[in-house]
Amino acid sequence: MTVEFPILQIVDENGQLVNEQYRDQMTKELVKEFYYNILRIRTFDRKAVSLQRQGRLGTYAPFEGQEASQAGSAMALDKDDWIFPTYRDHGATLTFGAGMTRTLLYWNGRVEGNVPEEGKRIFPPAVPIATQIPHAAGAAMAEKRKGTNNAVIAYFGDGATSEGDFHEGLNFASVFQAPVVFFNQNNRFAISVPIEKQMNSGTIAQKALAYDMPGVRIDGNDIFAVYFQVLEALNRARNGLGPTLIEAVTWRYGAHTTSDDPAKYRDQSESETIRKTQDPLLRIERYMKSNNLWDKEWIKKITEEITTEVEQAVRGMEQFPKPNVNDLFDNVFEKPTWTIAEQKEQYLQFTRREA
Amino acid sequence: MTVEFPILQIVDENGQLVNEQYRDQMTKELVKEFYYNILRIRTFDRKAVSLQRQGRLGTYAPFEGQEASQAGSAMALDKDDWIFPTYRDHGATLTFGAGMTRTLLYWNGRVEGNVPEEGKRIFPPAVPIATQIPHAAGAAMAEKRKGTNNAVIAYFGDGATSEGDFHEGLNFASVFQAPVVFFNQNNRFAISVPIEKQMNSGTIAQKALAYDMPGVRIDGNDIFAVYFQVLEALNRARNGLGPTLIEAVTWRYGAHTTSDDPAKYRDQSESETIRKTQDPLLRIERYMKSNNLWDKEWIKKITEEITTEVEQAVRGMEQFPKPNVNDLFDNVFEKPTWTIAEQKEQYLQFTRREA
Amino acid sequence: MMIEKELVNRPMGTNQLTLVQAITDGLRTMLKEDDSVLILGEDVGKNGGVFRATEGLQEQFGENRVMDTPLSEAGIVGTSIGMAVNGFKPVVEIQFLGFIYPAFEQIMTHVSRIRMRTMGSYTVPMVIRAPYGAGIRAPEVHSDSVEALFTHMPGIKVVCPSSAYDAKGLLIAAIEDPDPVLFLESMRSYRANREEVPEGKYMVEIGKGKKLQDGDDVTLITWGAMVPVALKAAEQARIQGMACDVIDLRTLYPIDKDIIAESVQKTGRAVIIHEAQQTGGLGNDIISIINDTSFLFLKSPIERVTGFDVPVPFFALEDKYLPTPQRVMKAIEKVMHF
Amino acid sequence: MMIEKELVNRPMGTNQLTLVQAITDGLRTMLKEDDSVLILGEDVGKNGGVFRATEGLQEQFGENRVMDTPLSEAGIVGTSIGMAVNGFKPVVEIQFLGFIYPAFEQIMTHVSRIRMRTMGSYTVPMVIRAPYGAGIRAPEVHSDSVEALFTHMPGIKVVCPSSAYDAKGLLIAAIEDPDPVLFLESMRSYRANREEVPEGKYMVEIGKGKKLQDGDDVTLITWGAMVPVALKAAEQARIQGMACDVIDLRTLYPIDKDIIAESVQKTGRAVIIHEAQQTGGLGNDIISIINDTSFLFLKSPIERVTGFDVPVPFFALEDKYLPTPQRVMKAIEKVMHF
Ligand SMILES: Cc1ncc(C[n+]2csc(CCOP(=O)(O)OP(=O)(O)O)c2C)c(N)n1
Ligand SMILES: Cc1ncc(C[n+]2csc(CCOP(=O)(O)OP(=O)(O)O)c2C)c(N)n1
Ligand SMILES: [Mg+2]
Ligand SMILES: [Mg+2]
C-alpha cells in the first residue's frame, strides 16, 4: 500500500522545502534547535561507540542515521508527556531531557542509568521487543482517566511490529482512545532481518488500518516532517481523538549493536550512499544554507558546547560511585522478603570474611 | 471500513439469489447437501445442549446460529486438507468428517474425543484463544514445503483477533505465503464482550490490510456465500497465492457455553429476531422453496437419518469404555520418564491396595 | 477452624459469605476506599466475571473503574503496568490461571522487575487475580495450578487463600501492597462453604501461614483447594491415633518459614500436599526449607502428595490426578512407619 | 575430564571444537542426515545467529531449510508446532532464553501437551535451542537462567550440556527424540574452551548425568555454566583435603536420579550449584530426590549455592549475583563441619 501511504516530506534531500503547510512555524529558532539536537545526539552516539571500542562501555546500540526521527519526535513532546523508548532511542530521551551521564551508565550495566531525571517521565528502555507498546497505551489510558492534557509516545522498530504486543497495544489504545503516539522507526532491519522478511506488507503505516487508527508514513530523515507530524498526532491525542501510528522511514548506518557485524548481512556501501544523500544532519545543513540560516560561528560554538557536555558526561560516568552490592537486594520489593534479606545478610557476611 | 468491506451475500434473507456469479455451480445436489449438513449439525448441537442439561455431558459450547458458516466452510475443503478448529467448531469438524461419538466424548472430558478419524487431518479444538492460528500457518508452510496441493483452514472468533497470536500467525502466513484460510466467525460477542469493546475497527476483514492479504467479509448465515468464498480462498492458497482472511458475520443464539447466562449481558430477544430473519436453515429452506427444490419426503427422510445418527452417537458415547487411568500417564512422552513411570507404578499399587 | 483477627479497622458487622463473595466484598471495599483502584479483565463488567467475582461492581462504580477489556492477556497486563506506573492500582482478572501464559512475558520481564530496574522510581502496585485448579470438570487448560512458575519469579508475591475470611483480608492486603501480587483463587473453594466475614476493611498479613489444627505426630503443609483434603486426612489419621499439625500456607511467596520449622521441629515428620505436578512443584521448596531449618529434627523422609508429572488431564480423569485424603493418609502412614 | 563414548555410529575422526562450534556441527550433521530437519529463528540465516551457532548453514542448505523468521517468538514456536505435526522436525532458535517468554503459552499449552491431548495422534518432535545465563556483560533480561520454569512443565525435556562433546551428542539426541526438548546453551561456555568432538553422528543419552570427578567427602551437583565453578571449588577443596564427587547433570528433566543417589549415599553430603534464583530453583528438586532416595545417608543438611531471589542484575553487579568457587567452597566447608 505504498501508494495509499506515500512518504511525507517537508524538506527534501537537497534541503528544499517541498511542502508549504508548516512554513509559518518553521522559525529560525526552531530550525536551529533541530540542528542543535541532531548534532548533540550524534556527538553522543559517536562518543558512545568509541568508548565501547576502548572497553570503557559495554555493548552499545548506535542510532546514527536516525537522529532526525529521534530528535524531531522528542522535541514535539510537552514536558509532562511520557516517553517509552527502546535500547536504541537514547537520542530521543536525551532530547527530551534524560541525563547524559545516566545514559552512559545504563550502557555500562549500571541500573542507576534507569533513574529518570526529577520530574521527567522517561521509562527505562524496553529490552524485550515491543513490550513497551502496551505500557505506553496504559500510561495514556491513565492520563485520560485523570483528565490531564498529557500525551504519551512509544518508540519501536520495524521488527517490533511482528510481536503480539504491538498488536495488543495498538488494539487497546484504539479501543480506549488513549492519547498515545506509536512512533515507529523503520530502519529496514531487525538485526540482520530485512523488512521484506519481517512482513509482507509494503508499509508499516498501513497496519493502522487494522485498528481504524490514523496511519502516517514520513521521511524519518526529514526532521521537519517528523516534528510536525508527531506534533499533529500529539495534538489529536490531547484533543481526545485517540492514538496515531507513525512510520518514520530511516536507516541505521552502523551495526545493530557494537557486538554485531553488519557486513555479514548487508552491503555496507549502501549505508555510505544513504549517508551522502539522505543524512539528517546534512539535510538540515542544506536547508539552513539555502535559507540563509547557516552561521559558522554558531556552529562552532554549539559544537564546542556539545563536546564539553559529552565529555563531562563521560567523566560523570567514570567518576560515578562504584556499584553498590546492596542494590542487588534492596529494590526488588519495597521491603525485602525474608529470603532476600537472609541471602543479603549471608552474602555480606561472606564478603566481609573473604575481604 | 464497512464501506470498503461490504458484507457479501449470494442468497439474501428471503432466500432470493442476489448474486449470479456462482449460479452454475449451485446444483440441486449441492443445495441439498447444504441443507443436510446444516440440519445435521443443528440436530447434534441441540442434542448436546440437552444432554448437558440432563447431566449426561460436561459444559458444552453451542454453535446454533453459526451452522452456515461452519458447514459451508468445511464443505469447501478437500479431503487431505487440514482443519484447526476451536471449541465451538464441532459443526465444522463434523461436516469435515470428525466422529460424532468422539465429539461427544470430548465434551465429556474424555481425551479420546481428540483422536481424529483415520486419515482425517483434524486438530483438537484450541482452548487457549487464538493459539491455533500460528499452528495452521505452520501446517500450511509444511504443505507448501512438501509441494502438495493441500490447504489449511483455521477457525476463530471475533474475540480471538485481539490476541497476539492472531497477529503473529497472520504475519507468518503472509511472509511465507502459506496456503491457509483464516476463517473468522464474527458472532459479535466474546462471552459477554461485544465487538465494539473488542476493537475499534468496523470490520475484522480490514485487518487483512495489515498483512497485504486479501480480506473478505461475508454474510456468515448465507451458506452459499460462505462456501464459494472459502472455496475461492482455498483455490488461491492451492495456487500459491497465499493466505486469505475471511470474516463471516454471524450470531450465536444461545449462551457462550452451557455455564453462561447471556441474559446477563444482552437482550436475548435480539437472538429471537435474528432467528426469525437471518436463520441459516430458514434461509436455505426459503431458497429451496423458491427454487422448487423443497421435497418434504426427502426432508422427512434425512431428519430421521440424522436423528438416528445422533442417537447412535450418544449411545456410542455412553457405552464407551470407562476412562483408563493408564492414559493419565502413558501419552505424555513416547516413553515415560522415570518420574512418570514411578508415579504411575505407585499410584496403581495404591489403587490396587485401596480396592 | 481457628481464625485470627488481624483487623486494621474494627468492622461493623459480619456476613456469611462464600469465598467468591468475600472476594467481591474485598474488591468493593477497596473500590470504595481508594479511587485509584481499577478492575480490568475479560467479562468483568456487565457479566460480573465468569465466576461472578465482580458481580455488580461495574453497575456500582461505573465503566471507568470496572473495565471490560479486549481478549488479550498481554494487553491487559501490559496496559495495567502503564496505569500502575502512572498512579493507579489495577486489579486485573485473568479469567483462568491457565490463560495467564500469554501475559507471561509482561509479568516476568516487567511487572516483577520495574521496581528493581528503576531503583524504585517506578513501581507496579498491581494485583493479578486468577482462579486456578482442577476438580470442577472444566475443559482442559482451565485447571492448571502453576503457582510454582511465579514463586520462582523474583519480584512478585503469590497468595492463595483457602477460606472466605482469609480471601478478603489477603485481597485487601494485596491491593494495599506496594508491590505486585499474584492472587490465586481456588475454583473448587469458591462456593464450597460459607464463613463469617467482617464488613469493611481488614487485612490478613501476606507471608504468614495459619495453623488450622494442632497435633504432635505429623505436619501437613498445604494451601488453597488442598486444605480440605488435608483436613479430611488429618481426621482419618486422628481416628487411627495419629495427630496432625495442619498448616495452610496462605502465602506461597514468601513462604512462612517459621510456621513450618516450628511445627516440623515438634513433629519430626512432614507431608506436603499440592495439586500441581510434583517435579518443580512448590513441595520442593518446602522440603528445602525443612532441610535448611530442621534437618536434625527429621524422623523420616518428607513425603509429597501431589499431582503427577503430567498435564492436568481431561476432566474424566481429573479425580485420579488430584490428591485425595486417601493418598494423604497413605503418606502419613509412610512417614509414621519409616 | 572423563568422556564417555556413547556413539551410535563410529565417527570418522575428531575436531577440536568450542561448544558453539559443536552445536553448529550437530546441526549440520542432522540437516544432512534428515531432510525433515528445519532450522528457524531470528537472524539464523545470513547472519548465522547472533552467536554464530548457525553460521554457514543457510548457505549450505538453502533458505528452505534454514529460515530467518519475523521477530515473533510465539509465531516461531506456534508455526513450528504446525510444521512438527505435519511431518517436520523444527529446530527453533530463541535468540536468548530471556526472550522465550512470548512463546510461553505455545510451549506450555501446546508443545508439551499435544501428544497427550491426542493420545499420540499428533506429536511435536521439536527442539528449542536457547542461549542462557549471566556472565557475558549482556544487557538485562538476556542473562536469565529459567530452566526451572520448564522442568516443571510436563511434556517437555530439558537438556543443558557443559562441554562441546556433550553439546553435539545431546543436540543430536534431542533432534532424534520423538518429543519436544528445550536445549539450553550456556553463553559463557560457548567459547570457553575446545574439546575433541567426533565427526558425524553420535548421541549422548538424554536423562543421564556424568561424573566428572570422584571423591568421597562431598557431592557437588551442577550443570551448564556452573560446571567450571564447581570444578574450581573441588580443586580448592582437594587442596584442603576434602574430596568431591562432581556431577554434571546434563539433563535437567528428567534428572538422573541414580547418579545423585549413588554419590550422596557414598558421601553423605551434597552441595548444589546453580545460577538461577534459589526459591523455586532446580536445587529444590535435587534436594527432594536426595530426601526420597538417601535420607538415612545424609550427614548434614544439603547446601545450595545459587543466584539470589532477585532478578538477574544489570551486568555491573552480575559477578556478585553468580555463584563463585569461593561461595561453593564455603558451602563445602559448611557441609563438612556440620
Ligand atoms: C522478545 C525479544 N526477542 C528478541 C530480542 C533480540 N533482539 C534485540 S534487538 C532485535 C531486533 C529489533 O529490530 P527492530 O525492532 O527493527 O529495532 P532496531 O533494532 O532496528 O532499532 C532483536 C531480535 C529481544 N530483545 N526481545
Ligand atoms: C487465552 C485465553 N483467554 C481467555 C479464555 C477464556 N475464553 C474462552 S472463550 C472466550 C471468548 C472467545 O470469544 P470469540 O473469540 O469471539 O469466540 P466465540 O466464543 O464467540 O466463538 C474466552 C474469553 C481462553 N479460552 N483463552
Ligand atoms: Mg529496525
Ligand atoms: Mg465471538
Image (spheres, coloured by chain):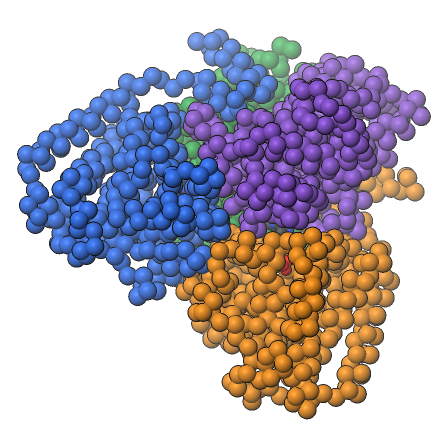
Chain colours: A orange, B blue, C green, D purple
Residue B317 vs C179, above or below: the answer is above
Query: Which residue occupies the foreground of this view, A247 or A197?
Result: A197
Marks counted in the figure total: 0
The residue drawn where x is 81% and y is 40% is A347
Image x and y of residue B143, in percent: 44, 38
- Residue C270 horizontal/vertical position (percent): 63, 21
The C terminus of chain D: image quadrant: top right
Answer whether residue C107 is visible to the viewer in this image.
Answer: no
Most foreground residue, A61 or A344: A61
Q: Quadrant of residue D187?
A: top right
Q: Residue at x 18, y 41 (%)?
A: B30
- Of the pair B190 and B287, the residue shown nearer to us: B287
Image location (x, y in percent) of residue A262: 70, 56
Q: In the image, is B65 to the left or to the right of C289? A: left
Residue shown at 67% from the left, 25% from the top: D201
Question: Residue C210, located in which quarter of the rendered image?
Answer: top right
Residue D305: x percent and y percent?
77, 33
Q: Quadrant of the N terminus of chain D?
A: top right
Q: Residue at left 41%, top 59%? A: B209
Residue B208 seen anywhere in this rendered image of the structure: yes
Q: Extreme bottom residue here?
A: A292
Vertical placement of D271 versus B266: above or below? above
User: Is residue D259 found left or right of D337 in the rendered image?
Assistant: left
Quadrant of ligand 3 in image: bottom right
